[in-house]
Image: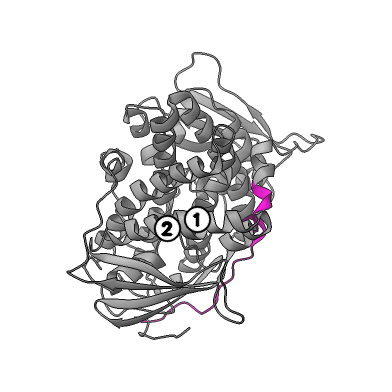
Amino acid sequence: MTRPFDADFGLHRLSRGDLCTLGRERLLAGHLQDRGSIPAVLRHHPMDEAYEIAIEEWMTASPVYTRRMQRLLGYAGDDVITIFKGLQLDIGFPHQFMDVGYEVHDRHTGDFWLRTCGALADVAPMGEAFVHGMCHTIEDPTFDATAVATNPRAQVRPIHRPPGVPRGGPDCHWTVVIDPAHDPVAPHPRLERVARSVLATLPNEPVDTTETGGRSDYSGPFEADFELEHLSHRALQIAVREFAIQGHLLARALMLAVDHHDGPDRAVEAGRALFTGIAWITAERIHRALGTGDDLAALANTLQLTHLLGLVDYTGLSVTMPDADTITLTLAPDAPALAEGDPYSLAGLLDLGAYEIVDALVHGANPGAVVSHPEANRSPAVWTITAPPGVEPVIEPDEVQVMRFSTGPTTVLIRRRPLAVGSAPASTSHP
């Protein structure tokens, strides 16, 4: 996808095919954020307390972004189909890294299963206690919290899950039942703080284009084998932008959860680790997946495509090229993220001086680039990026190296079916 730099770049400038590729990358990037933040939490907590923070993160973010996607893609409802459509568009289940199957029995019952689970592959080498922590301690409350965005009387319960994986079967298998007799699942008591965020109300208004084909929303039949290729150009713009919002909401929810347990200093510490680790990994992966090239214009394009900088109307971080040898990254002093009332956003952390995040973002795509940090007390803050010859590649910081234990950074995501020409047909699949 080699192209000249465009300071006014938007998702509408990408083809449907490139939007599908970018969408899968953003789903995976948002999912991998915890690989950077949880090690920072574990510096100060035993594992059981770190689980509590992770549970709060997902329980306070997922209902917010689930309802957003329901509204934007036109499938809001109170049944199992609505729950499953939401899971198909949730960074908790990044496509292919988490290979999920679905079967709807009726409006109130259904099953889903993971043929393979990248998250399980990450924790399995760490021992059965870690597997139990993820597949039991964390998933029990967080699955219900995601379902509560659709119906508070939905219950997600295991048929089987690790460590008890049957020979030849899927990694886990769950059933979803909606019953008026079920006690309603209560929202997390701190959900409302995330829901009140400026980020949570960010608009999502796609630009009309002439590219045709695919579903304009997800209001019609449920696609058990759903892929992003089923969506139209307009619907893809919505979904890919929402994947970026999901990632930022989870990061914010994580920092708010750490603040509640440990105070603001450790919340900022966890946020810096999260964004530094994922900045390098996501820039590295997008640079490779979308073939943006090796010159400075390619680096600028990669920066724009990451979910970190893909929300300029929230982060206030804009990429420009004043000349062919220079990139500038500018943080607007009136960025909406700086109006959150706390530093728990990418812009908020940079405003505090977390410049290592920008270093990681640039070096993930070009380890030999040189980043000049903003002058003290200058407003707006401006980073200057150049690529002089002969510069030794920088060494990955610890926050990136710790993420390499995951299979996510090296997972290859592929197109599994062609772009839909018309509205994609409904289908079913079985375990």
Instruction: Identify which amino acid the numbered label 1 is placed on.
Output: Arg
Q: Earlier in the sequence, mark 2 or mark 1?
A: 1
Rounded to the nearest angstrom, the CA distance separating label 2 from label 1 is 7 Å
The answer to which of 128 and 387 lies nearer the viewer is 128
Q: Is residue 250 magenta?
A: no
Q: Which mark is residue 284?
A: none
Q: Are marks 2 and 1 in contact (CB under 8 Å)?
A: yes
How far from the left and from the top, in percent, is residue 41?
54, 37
Q: Which residue is mark 2?
A: 240
Question: Would residue 165 appear left or right of 407 to someone viewing this image?
Answer: left
Q: Write the start and end of the magenta stretch as one range.
A: 403-423
Q: Is residue 61 visible?
A: yes
Question: Would residue 370 appear left or right of 300 to someone viewing this image?
Answer: right
Q: Taking 190 as reference, is 291 above or below it?
A: below
Task: Identify the residue shown where x is 33% and y is 41%.
Answer: 199
Q: Residues within 10 Å of mark 2 (few under 14, many from 20)?
A: many
How far from the left and from the top, in percent, is residue 414?
59, 70
Instruction: Identify which amino acid the numbered label 2 is placed on.
Output: Val
Q: Which residue is mark 1?
A: 26
Task: Identify the residue shown where x is 31% and y is 62%.
Answer: 147
Q: Taking 429 as reference, is 304 above or below it?
A: above
